[in-house]
Image (cartoon, helix red, strand yellow):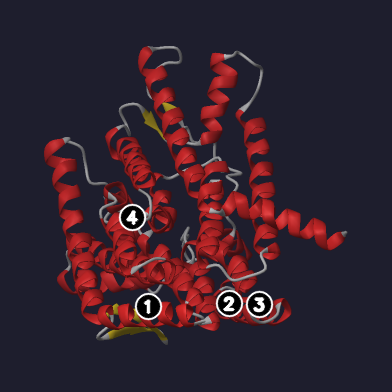
């Protein structure tokens, strides 16, 4: 007993030395984390995040002679200009994104109108996305503090801040905005602010849909300390309220608006060639000469997506205790499944799950190396290969030519790299697969 007291006293003494000025965040006090250390980390992460954007622009244009893609930003600008003529999106003209995406668009549109300069809109929009990216990197860091030591949490933030392929998409697309909302939702949830987490995840649904994928996992996570019925009602009420306020008015006038809020299965789209679906189809059809269509492969992939999501929800339900790291793993697997199994693919989907990857690789040098390998693949895919080796719906070189095989080989290696990284994240050594086996064993014992 005396020995245990000595150990406890030693631990408290060690905490006192490290935490002379304990850090507090969102109602949680970290006795072993010094406030000045956190301030230093936050400053470094913000600086690294901003610098990386300039580094990416320089290397893309000057070193690799490629381009900065302003196409989507032009679409955002064109979606805002009809407002000056009193037109309403969804009613008077088509807008393919959920309504809350207008928040950054309008914020960037105001200075553009005042200056009558389209480039001002582009620069304003890019600046807003960098602000969102800073919020993402800080969310990674503060979530990391709940999972790791402050040093490893800093590594997680730094890994995300230096994710160069993701940085490219931050300054060329809008995906940093919904991803920011997703990460804030997870941050609130892990810090015990259930309602704020639900509000954030629901808001994400009205920006680019995918953040709402985290909502059922958050409900199941919170239910470990309350009750599933309580959390379902709480989250359901908030989601319904947002639907009534942001969706119903438009849907009553134009029912087609509802299709904007469905994660499209691409009914009117072909299979994009940078998908896992098309890569598998290419081997089956062109290499092994099997009589198979892209549609049939896509159908199987969507079935697998559904099975994967159901299994992930089951594991989240079966887990008996709150585990922030497992919550992050489950949400990562769910979002990655959406990207991997769907038949259409925009390269910027990488932004959706990169913060989660950065969090989960921060404690292992092998995983960190694998993370940057996937970043290299993603950066080569877009912008370096786009237009030269593939466009959305076809390879640019004829089937069977050397360049066609190079393109197929590249996408094959890219998806293998991501799957290997995902495996290293959830492998038994890191807990999830071992945990899955434990869950099954526990349930079997309970039934017996």
Q: Earlier in the sequence, mark 2 or mark 3?
A: 3
Q: Residues within 10 Å of mark 3 (few under 14, many from 20)?
A: some
Q: Residue at x 68, y 55 (%)?
A: 438
Look at the numbered disc 2 and give the secondary structure of its residue: helix
Mark 3 near mark 4, Cβ–Cβ under 8 Å? no
| Vertical order, 24 against 44 (above or below) | below
Mark 1 near mark 4, Cβ–Cβ under 8 Å? no
Q: Earlier in the sequence, mark 2 or mark 1?
A: 1
Mark 2 near mark 4, Cβ–Cβ under 8 Å? no
Look at the numbered disc 4 and give the secondary structure of its residue: loop
Q: In this view, which residue lies farthest toward the right?
A: 448
Q: Residues within 10 Å of mark 1 (few under 14, many from 20)?
A: few
Which residue position holds label 4? 173
Look at the numbered disc 1 and give the secondary structure of its residue: helix
Marking on residue 249: 2
Q: Residue at x 71, y 76 (%)?
A: 228
Q: Earlier in the sequence, mark 2 or mark 4?
A: 4
Q: Nearer the viewer, residue 30 or 245?
A: 30
Q: Quadrant of the C terminus?
A: bottom right
Marking on residue 11: 1
Q: Earlier in the sequence, mark 3 or mark 1?
A: 1
| Vertical order, 370 against 326 (above or below) | above
Q: State how far apart marks 3 and 4 are (Cα).
A: 30 Å
Q: Nearer the viewer, mark 2 or mark 4?
A: 4
Q: In this view, which residue lies farthest toward the left?
A: 62
Q: Residue at x 34, y 26 (%)?
A: 389
């Amino acid at each position: 007993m005396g020995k245990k007291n000595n150990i406890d006293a030693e631990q408290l003494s060690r905490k006192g030395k490290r935490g002379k000025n304990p850090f507090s965040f969102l109602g949680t006090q970290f006795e072993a984390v010094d406030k000045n250390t956190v301030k230093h980390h936050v400053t470094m992460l913000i600086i690294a995040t901003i610098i990386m954007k300039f580094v990416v622009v320089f290397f893309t244009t000057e070193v690799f002679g490629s381009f900065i893609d302003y196409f989507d930003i032009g679409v955002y600008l064109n979606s805002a200009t009809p407002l000056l003529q009193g037109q309403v999106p969804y009613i008077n003209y088509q807008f393919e994104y959920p309504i809350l995406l207008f928040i950054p668009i309008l914020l960037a549109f105001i200075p553009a109108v005042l200056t009558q300069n389209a480039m001002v809109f582009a620069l304003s929009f890019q600046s807003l996305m960098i602000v969102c990216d800073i919020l993402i990197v800080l969310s990674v860091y503060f979530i990391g503090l709940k999972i790791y030591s402050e040093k490893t949490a800093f590594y997680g933030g730094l890994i995300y801040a230096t994710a160069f392929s993701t940085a490219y998409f931050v300054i060329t697309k809008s995906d940093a905005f919904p991803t920011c909302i997703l990460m804030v939702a997870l941050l609130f949830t892990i810090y015990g602010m259930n309602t704020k987490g639900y509000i954030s995840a629901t808001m994400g649904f009205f920006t680019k849909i995918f953040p709402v994928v985290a909502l059922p996992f958050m409900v199941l996570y919170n239910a470990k300390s309350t009750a599933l019925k309580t959390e379902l009602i709480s989250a359901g009420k908030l989601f319904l309220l947002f639907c009534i306020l942001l969706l119903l008015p438009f849907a009553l006038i134009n029912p087609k608006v509802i299709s904007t809020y469905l994660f499209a299965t691409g009914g009117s789209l072909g299979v994009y060639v940078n998908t896992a679906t098309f890569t598998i189809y290419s081997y089956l059809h062109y290499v092994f000469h099997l009589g198979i269509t892209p549609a049939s492969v896509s159908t199987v992939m969507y079935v697998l997506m559904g099975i994967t999501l159901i299994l992930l929800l089951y594991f989240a339900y079966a887990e008996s205790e709150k585990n922030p790291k497992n919550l992050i793993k489950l949400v990562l697997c769910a979002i990655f499944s959406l990207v991997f199994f769907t038949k259409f693919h925009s390269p910027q989907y990488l932004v959706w799950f990169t913060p989660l990857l950065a969090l989960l690789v921060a404690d292992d040098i092998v995983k960190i190396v694998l993370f940057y390998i996937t970043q290299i693949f993603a950066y080569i895919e877009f912008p370096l290969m786009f237009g030269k080796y593939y466009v959305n719906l076809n390879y640019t070189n004829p089937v069977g030519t050397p360049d066609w095989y190079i393109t197929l080989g590249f996408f094959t290696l890219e998806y293998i790299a991501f799957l290997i990284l995902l495996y290293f994240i959830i492998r038994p050594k890191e807990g999830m697969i071992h945990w899955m086996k434990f869950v099954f064993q526990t349930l079997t014992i309970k039934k017996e």
